[in-house]
């Protein structure tokens, strides 16, 4: 009889464990089903948001196209026609800033931008003009040494935004160098150009003359010598 009781007790424990396991599995399956339902709901919300965003982008694109079709429309970019754009290697003294800056406010205020006439550079570096000096084998070396001595590069980063150097060769024994400064911290003078005419004597180069002119942000004086 005791054996039967023991066997019955073991069977009861086993059935109870199975019953608890089935309940846990059932509970987990219910939670998993809830998670799947929430995931489907979120995916539907994301799909709807994506469709709305595509619709807004399409509306914006159509609005821009309509705006561009209106007369007098101008976007934020400055466009230069092929006829007006500077030709590389053609004009060595071209200030590229003149083609990319917006000067509309200058014109609205009644100012007429312009450039002064070339005038003589007032410097003291006379030894650069000696044809017998055997210091510079290239116009580039001569131009660089002249800039250091005249301290023309000391403005860069302090009083001038940009300095551009160019050299052209009108003939085998003649070179013309340009030092183009632009972006002065000045409401009258926007930039300054220097022109160095150099010649070759035997294997060496020397200065023939140095000229300077100003880029005027507002007006040029009547005598074309200064910015007003």
Image (tube, rainbow, N blue to C red):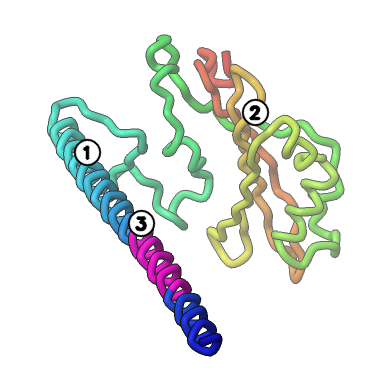
Q: Marks 3 and 1, Cα distance to the nearest angstrom?
A: 32 Å
Residue beneath the point at 44% across and 68% down: 20
Residue range of the region highlighted in magenta in the rendering: 16-32
> Label 2: few (<14), some or many (≥20) within 10 Å?
many
Left or right, 199 with respect to 69, comes to right
Q: Pick the quarter of the image with the C terminus.
A: top right
N-term mark: 3 or 1: 3
In this orientation, which residue lies closer to the viewer: 99 or 226? Answer: 99
Q: Which residue is mark 3?
A: 35
Q: Per the image, is 215 magenta?
A: no
Q: Which residue is mark 1?
A: 56
User: Does 122 appear above or below 15?
Assistant: above
Disc 3 on helix, strand or loop?
Answer: helix
Q: Position of residue 139 (x, y in %)?
A: 70, 60
Q: Which residue is mark 2?
A: 184
Q: Marks 3 and 2, Cα distance to the nearest angstrom?
A: 66 Å
């Amino acid at each position: 009889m005791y054996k039967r009781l023991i066997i019955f007790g073991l069977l009861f424990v086993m059935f109870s464990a199975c019953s608890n396991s089935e309940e846990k599995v059932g509970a987990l399956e219910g939670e998993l089903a809830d998670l799947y339902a929430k995931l489907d709901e979120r995916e539907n919300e994301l799909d709807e948001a994506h469709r709305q965003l595509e619709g807004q982008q399409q509306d914006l694109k159509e609005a821009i196209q309509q705006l561009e079709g209106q007369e007098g429309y101008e976007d934020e970019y400055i466009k230069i026609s092929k006829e007006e754009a500077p030709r590389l290697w053609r004009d060595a003294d071209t200030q590229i800033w003149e083609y990319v800056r917006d000067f509309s406010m200058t014109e609205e205020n009644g100012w007429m931008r312009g450039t002064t006439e070339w005038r003589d550079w007032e410097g003291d570096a006379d030894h650069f003009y000696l044809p017998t000096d055997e210091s510079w084998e290239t116009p580039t070396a001569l131009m660089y040494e002249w800039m250091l001595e005249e301290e023309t590069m000391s403005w860069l980063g302090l009083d001038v935004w940009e300095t551009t150097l160019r050299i052209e060769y009108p003939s085998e024994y003649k070179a013309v160098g340009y030092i183009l400064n632009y972006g002065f911290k000045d409401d009258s003078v926007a930039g300054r150009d220097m022109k160095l005419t150099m010649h070759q004597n035997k294997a060496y180069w020397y200065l023939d003359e140095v000229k300077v002119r100003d880029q005027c942000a507002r007006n040029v004086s009547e005598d074309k010598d200064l910015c007003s």
